[in-house]
Amino acid sequence: MEGFGSIVARFPQRELDIWRRCARDARFRAICSDYEEMTAALDHLLKSVGNGDPKIEEYTSFLGELEAEILGYLDNSISNEQKS
């Protein structure tokens, strides 16, 4: 399981939770993969056109949605483990 550096860099305090969830949840891995792809696309866009492209706001918004979804998965995972 490689290639989740952006999400780990964004939430370093949750790194262990991220790797554990990735190891057992294909849907979570797919969301993290989407996050990595969107991060790379945004970085490329910023380097090629700068801040003037309207897609930047759209990409940034989508990254925020993915972050919220990822944190939701992680928080749900922790609450489920505490119930067990």
Image: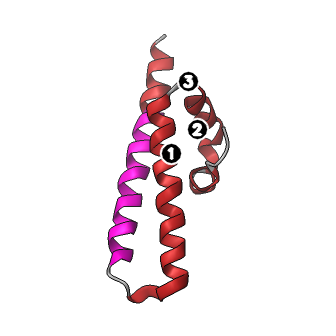
Q: Residues within 10 Å of mark 2 (few under 14, many from 20)?
A: many
Residue type at numbered disc 1: Cys
Q: Residue furthest top?
A: 84
Assess whether mark 2 and mark 3 are in contact (beta carbons under 8 angstroms).
no
Mark 3 → mark 1, Cα distance in angstroms? 13 Å
Q: Earlier in the sequence, mark 1 or mark 2?
A: 2
Residue type at numbered disc 2: Ile
Q: Look at the image and name its color scheme.
A: secondary structure
Q: Position of residue 3 (x, y in %)?
A: 64, 49
Q: Which residues are magenta?
A: 55-75
Closer to viewer: mark 1 or mark 2? 1
Mark 1 → mark 2, Cα distance in angstroms? 9 Å
* Of residues 26 and 64, the one drawn nearer to the viewer in this rendering: 26
Magenta-drawn stretch contains 33: no
Q: What residue did someone put label 2 on?
A: 18
Assess whether mark 2 and mark 1 are in contact (beta carbons under 8 angstroms).
yes
* Of residues 47 and 17, the one drawn nearer to the viewer in this rendering: 47
Q: Earlier in the sequence, mark 3 or mark 2?
A: 2
Task: Tell me which secondary structure the magenta stretch mostly adopts.
Answer: helix
Q: What residue did someone put label 3 on?
A: 24
Q: Residues within 10 Å of mark 3 (few under 14, many from 20)?
A: few
* Of residues 10 and 44, the one drawn nearer to the viewer in this rendering: 44
Q: SS class of the residue under badge 2?
A: helix
Q: What residue did someone put label 1 on?
A: 32
* Of residues 35 and 20, the one drawn nearer to the viewer in this rendering: 35
Residue drawn at (50%, 18%) of the image: 82
Q: Position of residue 47 (x, y in %)?
A: 55, 82
In the rendered view, would you say 81 is above or below 73? above
